[in-house]
Image (tube, helix red, strand yellow):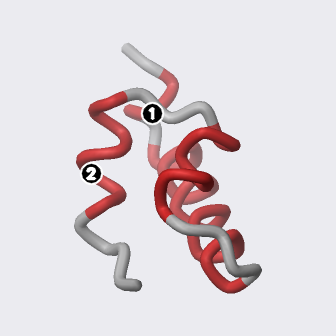
Amino acid sequence: MTAFSSNTDHFIKQRMMVYLREQGFNFYQSAVLLKLTQQERDILSQDWTE
């Protein structure tokens, strides 16, 4: 089981992505800062709008 599989970790990463977007970061910068795996990037990119 990966850390991303738990609901709490997913929620935290999702909220951090929203926060970083509001701070002016683009998707790539946010993914690098949060050290997301490719699977996490694929999942979270569905909610990202620029």
| Residue kind at label 2, given as amino acid type | Ile
Q: Residue at x 48, y 61 (%)?
A: 27
In the depicted structure, whether residue 21 falls above or below residue 16: below
Q: Nearer the viewer, residue 48 or 1?
A: 48
* Label 1 environment density (alpha carbons within 10 Å; few <14, some 14–19, many ≥20): some
Tell me, for residue 43, which label it has, or none. Answer: 2
Is the C terminus in the top left, top right, bottom left or bottom right quadrant? bottom left
Tell me the residue that label 1 is attached to.
Answer: 4
On the picture, is 48 further left or further right than 14? left
Q: Residue at x 57, y 48 (%)?
A: 8
Q: Nearer the viewer, residue 9 or 39?
A: 39
Q: Residue at x 76, y 80 (%)?
A: 23
| Comes first in the chain, label 1 or label 2 | 1
In the image, residue 6 lies at what x, y percent? Answer: 46, 37
Discs 1, 2 touching: Cβ within 8 Å:
yes
Q: Secondary structure at mark 1?
A: helix
| Residue kind at label 1, given as amino acid type | Phe
